[in-house]
Image (spheres, rainbow, N blue to C red):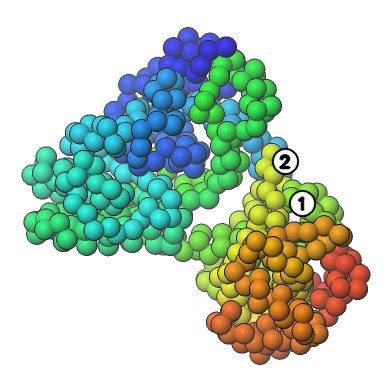
Amino acid sequence: MTYLSRNIVLAEAATAAVALPNAAQFELPEKVLQFGTGVLLRGLPDYFINKANQQGIFNGRIVVVKSTDGGDINAFSRQDGLYTLCIRGIEDSEQVEENVVCSAISRVLSAKSQWAEVLKFAASPDLQVVISNTTEVGIQLLQEDIHQTPPQSFPGKLLAVLYARYQAFGGDKSKGLVIVPTELIPDNGSKLEAILLELAHRNGLETEFLDWLETANHCCNSLVDRIVPGRPDVGSYNALSEQLGYDDDLLTMSEVYRLWAIEGDEHVRSVLSFGQVDKGVIIQPDINEFREMKLRLLNGTHTLSCGLAHLSGFETVRGAMDDEVFGSFIGHLMLGNLLPGIPYPVSEAKARDFGRQVLDRFRNPFIEHRWLAITLNYTAKMQMRNVPTLLHYYQQRRGVPQSIALGFAAYLLFMRGTHEQNGTWYGELGGEQYPIQDEKAGYFAELWQKLSPAVLVTTVLQNQALWGHDLGQLPGFANQVTEYLQQMLDHGAYAAVTTLLNNQVLVEK
């Protein structure tokens, strides 16, 4: 079997199981400079651009900068920049299976060996957009000379590109770029812009360039949300290759759900015209509501469910959702307790729609998301994701959120370390050990050794160093957490979930 290539696409040699680009898409101008070749970029921004190109809307291709030689740069070269995106999951309660050959990537340049080509592209009149995903540590300020070949950091490389563009067009303000980082940090665009300006100062660049940098370019905050596992296991890959009719070293698996929320004005919207083709692209002046919904509903539900699900005997999110009792608990937790506690003004209808989409994602039969993996840094996640929600819930409802209380009790039980080995604490469930990968594991192990459950609950809730608040002051919360904790100690976690549902004490509104 041969590899995916432009020849296969133009000869329509692939099977009918995949959507192919047309010949005109290979001739589109290069409008985008992208830092990074990772699967998130291929599965989300590049997918949207490819979809728009198919509909004749954005009409632009991507030049990708890879930080090092080797790796998938050879695959991109061999496959003419083409890759297959295999989309699998649940949308509107219907199962989706879709295969798309994406042709948005024109070429991939090595920053290490082809930096001159990158700077040459910086002077292209067609260039309009910069996209990046260089991991969370990529957006950082280093003391460096941007005239290196190449600069070390991503902001250093981007500043060199912008300076080359400024020089090529004599400071023409119409040649500024729309810059959209997708790194998973809050206010990523604002932070990147601040680093660029500071780095320009440190490099002694002229005042006129500083003005052009700040006024002619748009650094947009953005939020990305899509699970893109990348290449499947060998068995699944071989089956897909047989189905598609070719091999593809860049084949990428993705869930159906997609969100790219971008903070921008009408100018940004007009430049990023690919946003017209998919409901997953949202461009508006404030995207905080999307960050809050993702953090509180998706991430918050994961955190409050992970310990409880593990203690109830479930290994994966999908497995828990397939169970009628536990699946009902997760739905009530998200829509009954967490939604009304979102500490940000969000439309309830919009939040409920988002929540239902999250529940569809949790049911995805093609994604194996393990609960134990979600327990990593359990305490820090609980503080960041759920404490603000809990506090706001009390302000809004002034009653105990039962599902949150059960989830918190399960967190305390999960953190009951029984022994330490090579610096890692382990808990025990049904005679089997599980790792407690949390920097506070030792603290909880000590509490469990010397305190009764009721005293332990009160001690932990009152620990302001953990939560930033005295949660013991919340009326009825400590008593309810203690009651659920004792139920789990006596009868098991799953029985506690069943009892909660049977007693119909969940808040439905």
Residue at the spot 66% in from the left edge and 40% down from the top edge: 89
Image coordinates of residue 416 in percent, x first then y, are 75, 71
Closest to the observer, 186 or 147: 147
Image coordinates of residue 392 in percent, x first then y, are 60, 78
Q: CA distance from mark 2 to mark 1?
A: 14 Å
- Tell me if I can see residue 18 in this picture: yes
Look at the image and tell me in which quarter the N terminus lies: top right
Closest to the observer, 96 or 488: 488
Q: Residue furthest right?
A: 491
Tag shown at residue 315: 1
Amino acid tagged 1: Glu
Closest to the observer, 16 or 184: 184
Residue at the spot 78% in from the left edge and 49% down from the top edge: 319
Mark 2 touches mark 1? (CB < 8 Å): no
Depicted 486 relative to depicted 42: above or below: below
Earlier in the chain: of badge 2 and badge 1, it is 1
Image coordinates of residue 379 in percent, x first then y, are 62, 70
Q: Nearer the viewer, mark 2 or mark 1?
A: 1
The picture quadrant where one finds residue 26 is top left
Secondary structure type for disc 2: loop
Amino acid tagged 2: Pro
Image coordinates of residue 173 in percent, x first then y, are 15, 49
Residue at the spot 72% in from the left edge and 81% down from the top edge: 447
Q: Which residue is mark 2?
A: 365
Look at the image and tell me in which quarter the C terminus lies: bottom right
- In the displayed structure, does residue 225 sit left or right of residue 32? right
Residue at the spot 65% in from the left edge and 28% down from the top edge: 234
Secondary structure type for disc 1: loop
- In the displayed structure, does residue 341 sit left or right of residue 284? right
Please rate how many residues cluster around mark 1, counting C-alpha atoms within 10 Å: few if below 14, some from 14 to 19, many from 20.
some
Please rate how many residues cluster around mark 2, counting C-alpha atoms within 10 Å: few if below 14, some from 14 to 19, many from 20.
some
